[in-house]
Structure formats: C-alpha cells, structure tokens
Amino acid sequence: MNNAPTTEDRIWAVISHLSSLAFGMGILLPIIGWSDQRRKSNYASFQCLQALGYQSLGFTVWVLLCLLVMIPLLLSLIGVPGLMGDGTANSDSLIGIWAAVFSIVTFGLFGLYFLLPIIAAVACGLGRDFRYPIMGNRLARYLRYDPAHTVDESAWLMDKHEDRWVAAMGHFSVIIALWGMLAPLAALLLHGQRNFFLKFQSIQALAFQVGTTLIYFGAGLVYSFGIFLLAATMGLTGEPNFDSPLAMLGIIIFFVSLLIALVIIMLIPLLHILGQWAGYRVLKGDDYRYPVIGKLVERRLAQAGSQTLIEPE
C-alpha cells in the first residue's frame, strides 16, 4: 500500500509549520490541523503536533537562547565608555561597531527562529517526513509515530500522549504574551467535550495565562498612575516645586508606584517558570494542578456537574 502523504496531508503540514512566522498569533492553526486530521492521517497529525511544539516549547528555548546571547551583549555596552578614551572619533567608531554587531546578532536570532519552519514547510510540501532538531525524533517516539507502518486502527498515534502533548503545550505557551492563550483556548473548544483531562488542563492553563497577563498589565497601570500624578503635581511649567507639599507627595507616589511596578514585573518570570513546570509535569504523566487556580477550576467544574477527573484514553 502507498503510504505517501496526500495533498491534503501536505497542505495541513505546510500551513501548520508556516504559522510559526506569525510569531505567536498562528499557534492555534496546528491545533486546528491536528483536530481535523487525527484518525485520518498520522503524517499530518504528527507534523501539526510538531509545529505546535515548535511554537510553544521551541519558542521557550529560543527566548532563553536570546537572553543568553543578548544580556552579555547589552552588558558589554557598559564597558564601551571605558574603552572609548577621550577621542570623539574613537568613541563614534566603537559605538558604530557595537551597533553593527548588535544588529547582526538580533537579525540572526530572528532568522534562526524563522528558518526552521520554512525548511519544514518546504520539506512537507515535497512530501518528506520532516523532523525538527532534537524535538522531532523525541516526539515521534512519544507518540509512537512510525511512517513506515500502514495506517490502520492499530497504528494510529498514541491517543493518550496526543492529548498530553496538546495540554502541555498550552502550559508552555504562557511565555507568549496574549497570543499564548490561543493554544489552551483552541484545545478547550475543539476537544474539551471529548476528554475531561484535556478540558481541565486547558481551562486551568487558560486561567493561569489570563492571570499572568493581568498582572503584567497591572504593573503598567501602576507605573502609569505614578507618572500621571507626578505630571499633575509638576504644574504647567513641567518643573517640580520642591517647596510645595503637593509636589513632594507626587514625587513620593511616583517612586512608590515605580517600585511596586518593578516588584510586579519581577514576578512575571517566576510565573513563566511555573507554566513551564506545569507543562513538564503533564508530559511526564502527572495530573498537575496550579496552586489555588487548580482547586478553583476543579471545584467550578464539579459544581457544573462534570465528571471526576480521568486520564485521557
């Protein structure tokens, strides 16, 4: 029997991989493709799930790589003034070199992220069985995907691990601001009624991401409030009157709001780490619950008449 992917299989695979170019906004397309192609095509299902993993787990790895590269590069700018000397020409030359290196590294990192899904789309368009480095073969073993097997009822991807992979990617996608919520939302809408485990994990991942996003914007509101009061107490001249109690009050409130905003922002990386931990636990086979949120979601589902949490079949 010919096991070559059909045109429909290749189209879904290509679309799923290219959705990475939307930089977060396209994360729901692989879930839609997997939902449409599961139990129809192992090839398309695997490529869609692989593309989903690249946009969530792969995006997390890419962000960490950017931090490891960019932070030392930005810190090096602190040492540039000491190397400049007093000569203006020397100063301009060093700044120009640093700016060129920074631009090359920045475009190189973005190019690295976009290059792999383009290669994947081209390979799938030609009907090849593309695998992302490191992740692809591991995912194939996790799902028991073997393209050499004839597709029959006994050779479908492992259903339990498919659901776990989709649920875990919903947790991992917390690192994608705003658009990361599309992953658990799409999983909930498309498969929430089929599997209660996926439903529960998607709801709590969505609630966790909404809370994280509100905290992030809350920090911005606190900071903006401080700026507004500072501007209001400075008067029309834009010059603070330090002899005025009102002006001093505005300055104090501004610095307090700035400190509060900084503390809130420092919580965001911790919440991202918690989301990554949740995804890892789900992949390992645990029925993970977020602190507080997990219990609240479970209680609300129980009140709604849902069944007891079960493992995905």
Image (cartoon, helix red, strand yellow):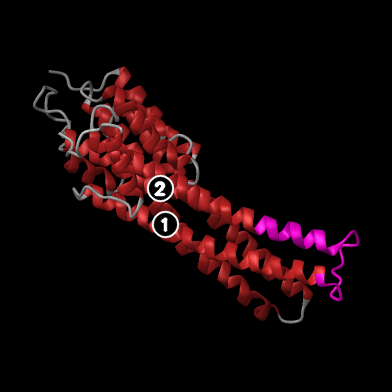
Residue found at x 44% / y 50%: 175
Residue found at x 19% / y 38%: 308
201 lies above or below 157: below
State the image coordinates of residue 1 (x, y, percent, origin top left): 12, 18
Identify which amino acid the numbered label 1 is placed on.
Leu
Secondary structure at badge 2 equals: helix
Say whether marks 2 and 1 touch (CB < 8 Å): yes
127 lies above or below 257: above
Query: How many neighbours does mark 1 have within 10 angstroms: few (below 14), some (14-19), or many (20 or more)?
Result: some
State the image coordinates of residue 313 (x, y, percent, origin top left): 15, 33
| Residue 271: mark in rendering | 1
- Answer with left or right where residue 169 lies relative to residue 39: right
Residue found at x 70% / y 66%: 253
Q: Nearer the viewer, mark 2 or mark 1?
A: 2
The answer to which quarter of the image holds residue 54 is top left
State the image coordinates of residue 69 (x, y, percent, origin top left): 48, 63
In the image, the segment drawn in magenta is: 223-245
- Of mark 2 and mark 1, the one earlier in the sequence is 2
Q: Nearer the viewer, residue 54 or 146?
A: 54
Separation of marks 2 and 1 at Cα, in angstroms: 9 Å
Residue found at x 73% / y 74%: 90
Secondary structure at badge 1 equals: helix
Q: Is residue 55 visible?
A: no
Indicate yes or no whether the magenta region holds residue 237.
yes
Query: How many neighbours does mark 2 have within 10 angstroms: few (below 14), some (14-19), or many (20 or more)?
Result: many
Q: Give the residue at mark 2.
A: 208
- Answer with left or right where residue 122 lies relative to residue 97: left
Q: Residue furthest left?
A: 154
How many marks the image carries: the answer is 2
State the image coordinates of residue 309 (x, y, percent, origin top left): 20, 39
Identify which amino acid the numbered label 2 is placed on.
Phe
Q: Is residue 120 visible?
A: yes
